[in-house]
Amino acid sequence: MAGRNKNTKRNVWRMEAQTRVLKTTNKLIIAVIFITIAVVFFATYLPEKRKMEKLQHDLEMAKNREADVEGRLDYLKIKLTALKEDPAFLEIQARDRLPFYRPGETIFQIER
């Protein structure tokens, strides 16, 4: 019976050693899997994040250009309305751009 206990203890020790090795191997495999998933995630996330930041910057620039164009459009609409409806404004514009003057007026032009 003593020989049988020795073999049983030896078998139990061997099984425990194999179990420890398997547990350690499993932990290493799980760690490698998680590290691989993290690397893949960041390898795909970072370029997309940079692309999104560039697109947001481009969108902001386009909105700024749109606001500038809308301001210019408003100015031109006001100027067009003034040209159509205000004869005094039309006269001022014509005098600035063309060498027109009324009889008896003396025009002084300053060159820039």
Image (tube, rainbow, N blue to C red):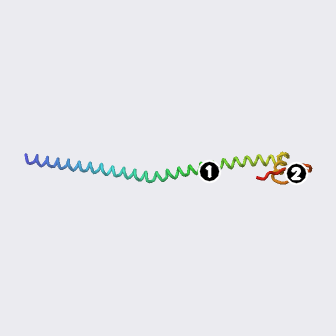
Q: Where residue 34 sits in the image (x, y, percent)?
A: 36, 50
Specify few, some or many for label 1: CA neighbours under 10 Å numbering under 14, 14-19, or 20 or more: few
Front-most of 105 and 17? 105
For disc 1, the marked residue is 62
Mark 1, secondary structure of its residue: helix
Residue 104: numbered disc: none
Q: Where residue 20 sits in the image (x, y, percent)?
A: 23, 48
Specify few, some or many for label 2: CA neighbours under 10 Å numbering under 14, 14-19, or 20 or more: few
Residue 101: numbered disc: 2
Front-most of 39 and 13? 39
Q: Earlier in the sequence, mark 2 or mark 1?
A: 1
Front-most of 96 and 26? 96
Mark 2, secondary structure of its residue: loop
Front-most of 87 and 91? 91
Residue sitting at x 12%, y 49%: 7
Q: Where residue 1 sits in the image (x, y, percent)?
A: 7, 46
Q: Give the number of the mark in front: 2 or 1.
A: 2
Instruction: Left or right? Give the position of 53 relative to 12.
Output: right
Q: Where residue 10 sits in the image (x, y, percent)?
A: 14, 48
Q: CA distance from mark 2 to mark 1?
A: 45 Å
Residue 29, visible in the rendered structure: yes
Q: Point out the residue furthest to the right here.
A: 104
Please state which amino acid type lies under the numbered disc 1. Answer: Ala
Please state which amino acid type lies under the numbered disc 2. Answer: Tyr
